[in-house]
Image (tube, rainbow, N blue to C red):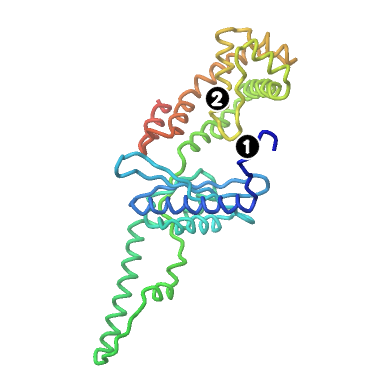
Amino acid sequence: MLGRDSSLSVMCSKTLRSNLVQDAERMRNNICSTLEQIDFVATTADCWSKGKRSFLGVTAHWINPSTLERESAALACRRLKGKYTFDVLARQMYSIYLDYSIQNKIVCTTTDNGSKFCIVFRYYVINKNIFSYILSTIWFSFFNRVYEEERENEDDNDEEFIELTSLLEGDDYSTEIILLPHHRCACHTLHLIATKDAEKAMINARYKQIFRSTLAKCHKLWAKQNQSTQAVDKIKDMLGAYLKTPVVTRWNSLYDAMLQINNHITHIPDSINNTCMDFCALPRFTDAEREFIKEYCQVMCPLSTALDILQGEKRNVHGLPVTCFVQPER
């Protein structure tokens, strides 16, 4: 390789693969040793498809008892083969919990509002009191069995040892899938409010017309910037920055993109029409459409602010969604 230090060598694929396996095992052992010291763990789970393949991702979150700070770790990113039904998801999630020995430490699992995850926890979730009752019943049956056999063999001097493992396996308790309480993701709930619930306003014909025409022009402008090098250079020269483009899976990215357009329209009224729309050969925004963009940003501002707060990595506590929901309601 040109410019490579002669003292360095490039590892082969076999060595690289072996190193990755060793690093992954070392990371897993470190997480297991950390979780052994933790009494309460919260988990998240998500399932997605990409490139004709499906995956299940699970993370764990806990409070460090020494620093009282929230810590997190990725537990697994497993490939799901075939159709991932609710029972497949439940089996895989419980298997991951068993791998890290946290099945009895989980206080709740947070997922999106997808129907598959909701069915999983509706079918397999169990109350902690019921779970404790089941464990006490198992132990009671074990000691009762030992007591009865001791009474039958009280004259026999031979000692007989009964394995608890065989007793539990005989009743098939080891294969029972038990999941603890389920929480729906607050961010995903707000996302649905801003998209699906907001679509109910489409029953108003005037609103439906102005909404679709405005969004159509915005999407054409964003597409033009992403497709044409001349357009992107012109937009950067005239506006001083590139236009933000929305991401399908994140609604607040649409709000941020609309807010940027609104800021340009507010401070320099003709900046978007005269520079961007005319240069890109796109129809201009009408006065009604510009007013709609302004009002859209005003109405959706509380939701976007709440999403930004809830998606923060730090200073995020369990009661925070309450304050975020009360403000938009007012």
Above or below residue 225? Residue 198 is below
Horizontal side of residue 272 vs 161, given as left or right = right
| Residue nearest the observer in this picture, 28 or 292 | 28
Q: Amino acid at mark 1?
A: Asp
Above or below residue 11? Residue 215 is above
- Residue lying at the far front of the rendered structure: 7
Q: CA distance from mark 1 to mark 2?
A: 50 Å
Q: Quadrant of residue 133?
A: bottom left
Q: Which residue corresponds to mark 2?
A: 255
Which residue lies at the image location 36% right of the left edge and 54% below the top edge? Answer: 36
Spot occupied by residue 160 in the image (x, y as percentages of width and height): 32, 84
Question: Under tag 1, what secondary structure?
Answer: loop
Query: Which quarter of the figure is the C terminus placed in?
Result: top left
Q: Quadrant of residue 83?
A: bottom right
Category of crowding for the residue at label 1, using alpha-carbon neighbours closer than 10 angstroms: few (below 14), some (14–19), many (at least 20) = few
Q: Are marks 1 and 2 in contact (CB under 8 Å)?
A: no
Question: Under tag 2, what secondary structure?
Answer: helix
Horizontal side of residue 25 vs 274, given as left or right = left
Q: Which residue corresponds to mark 1?
A: 5
The disc, 1 or 2, on the residue closer to the chain's N-terminal end is: 1
Count the marks: how many? 2
